[in-house]
């Protein structure tokens, strides 16, 4: 359990970094803080002293305690160490090492350092990462949003970066509540092409597995529905298996139930990404469903999984390293004073043929 003074420190620091308490503003009195946190005066004073030492607060005798912006000048960035913050949902999994490699390669060319944090797609961890970046005083920021298809309570932190004129951009997705430049795969087109590939091979009973707490999943669902509509194929709710970050650990068990229920009807599935596609392959093997003879699948992202799985996945490309490089280039150019930079960059996916799609012969 955290010491009480530490809880006060973290709470007040969060208020300052998120802009709830602004520079020059007087914070509540020691007595008010004592009552709010139900602690002694000594505990409050210990917390305020540490925050003052960190540069977040300053005391004026006989007047009170005020928010200071001195913490920014104490940071590594403001002392001449050019640093770009990077926050991704994951670091070592899936396509993320390639994205980070692209960012790092571009930053190295202009002698920028990289300050890296991950959120595990958890909003509380994203808040901590944003507070770290604000406290450090990064020159710019590249963010992959956390659960981008649900309301995010950390929006105030992004507005703090804007108020401080710290350039930032987003990759893979964005928060629709914010006006923010972004670099994204055209996810609607990716899932549309995946579905079109199956329709073109004669499939009419097509399911989809979609992750719905991220914007990518929302748009990939949209592309699936668009392709079905163009061919006058009926969208069937029972052919959809949705999941989110919290239910992802149960995906294998849910897939087993989904495949058994739809075994006699579905001939093909559009998978949210290669990781999900590999899970489908593994569950199908367990159930005795042959891919592609009994079930065809098309995946998305062209990750290392698509190339190295025990069956070569049919998939759609994702820019990965190029996206990271372009995002870093955008931040550097903005820091160099360039104004005419793109607000939106969409990368167009291309089908990569594998071994997981079978042609359905029309009788």
Image (tube, rainbow, N blue to C red):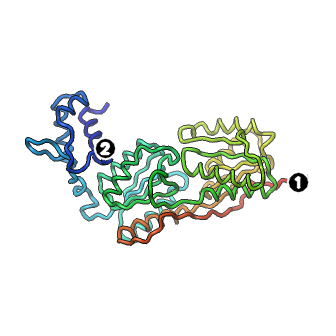
In three-dimensional space, the C-alpha distance between marks 2 and 1, rounded to whole angstroms, equals 62 Å
According to the picture, the residue beneath numbered tag 2 turns out to be: 14
Residue drawn 11% across and 42% down? 63
User: Tag 2, which secondary structure?
Assistant: helix
Tell which of 1 and 59 is nearer to you: 59
Residue drawn 88% across and 54% down? 362
The image position of residue 203, as x and y in percent, is 79, 52
**Location of residue 39 with respect to 270 vertically, above or below:** above
Is residue 272 visible from the viewing direction of this image?
yes
Crowding at label 2, few (<14), some or many (≥20) Cα neighbours within 10 Å? some
Tell which of 311 and 207 is nearer to you: 207
According to the picture, the residue beneath numbered tag 1 turns out to be: 362
User: Tag 1, which secondary structure?
Assistant: loop
Residue drawn 28% across and 46% down? 16
Which mark, residue 155?
A: none
Crowding at label 1, few (<14), some or many (≥20) Cα neighbours within 10 Å? few
> Left or right: 271 with respect to 332?
right
> Left or right: 359 with respect to 154?
right
Among the two numbered marks 2 and 1 on one chain, the one whose residue lies closer to the N terminus = 2
> Left or right: 261 with respect to 247?
right
The image position of residue 269, as x and y in percent, is 72, 48
The quarter in which the N terminus is drawn is top left
The picture quadrant where one finds residue 109 is: bottom left
The image position of residue 296, as x and y in percent, is 75, 50
Looking at this view, name the residue that lies furthest to the right.
Answer: 363
**Location of residue 60 with respect to 331 vertically, above or below:** above
Is residue 91 visible from the viewing direction of this image?
no
The image position of residue 222, as x and y in percent, is 64, 51
Looking at this view, name the residue that lies furthest to the left.
Answer: 62
**Location of residue 322 with respect to 222 vertically, above or below:** below
């Amino acid at each position: 359990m955290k010491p009480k003074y530490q809880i006060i420190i973290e709470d007040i620091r969060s208020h300052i970094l998120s802009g709830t308490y602004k520079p020059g503003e007087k914070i509540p009195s020691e007595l008010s803080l004592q009552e709010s946190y139900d602690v002694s005066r000594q505990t409050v004073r210990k917390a305020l002293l540490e925050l003052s030492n960190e540069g977040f607060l300053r005391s004026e005798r006989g007047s009170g305690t005020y928010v200071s912006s001195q913490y920014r000048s104490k940071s590594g960035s403001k002392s001449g160490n050019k640093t770009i913050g990077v926050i991704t949902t994951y670091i070592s999994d899936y396509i993320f090492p390639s994205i980070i490699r692209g960012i790092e390669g571009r930053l190295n060319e202009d002698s920028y350092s990289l300050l890296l944090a991950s959120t595990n797609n958890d909003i509380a961890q994203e808040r901590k990462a944003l507070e770290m970046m604000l406290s450090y005083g990064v020159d710019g920021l590249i963010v992959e949003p956390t659960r981008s298809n649900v309301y995010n309570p950390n929006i105030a932190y992004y507005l703090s970066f804007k108020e401080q004129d710290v350039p930032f951009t987003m990759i893979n997705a964005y928060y629709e509540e914010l006006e923010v430049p972004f670099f994204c795969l055209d996810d609607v087109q990716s899932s549309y092409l995946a579905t079109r590939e199956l329709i073109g091979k004669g499939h009419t009973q097509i399911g989809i597995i979609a992750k719905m707490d991220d914007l990518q999943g929302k748009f990939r669902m949209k592309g699936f529905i668009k392709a079905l509509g163009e061919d006058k194929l009926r969208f069937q709710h029972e052919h959809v298996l949705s999941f989110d970050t919290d239910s992802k650990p149960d995906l294998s068990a849910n897939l087993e139930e989904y495949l058994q229920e739809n075994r006699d009807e579905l001939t093909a599935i559009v998978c949210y990404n290669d990781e999900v596609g590999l899970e489908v392959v593994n569950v199908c093997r367990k159930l005795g469903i042959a891919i592609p003879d009994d079930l065809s699948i098309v995946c998305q992202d062209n990750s290392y999984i698509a190339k190295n799985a025990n069956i070569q996945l049919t998939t759609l490309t994702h820019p990965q390293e190029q996206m990271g490089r372009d995002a870093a280039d955008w931040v550097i150019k903005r820091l160099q004073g360039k104004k005419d930079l793109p607000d939106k960059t969409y990368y167009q996916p291309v089908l990569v043929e594998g071994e997981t799609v079978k042609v359905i012969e029309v009788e």
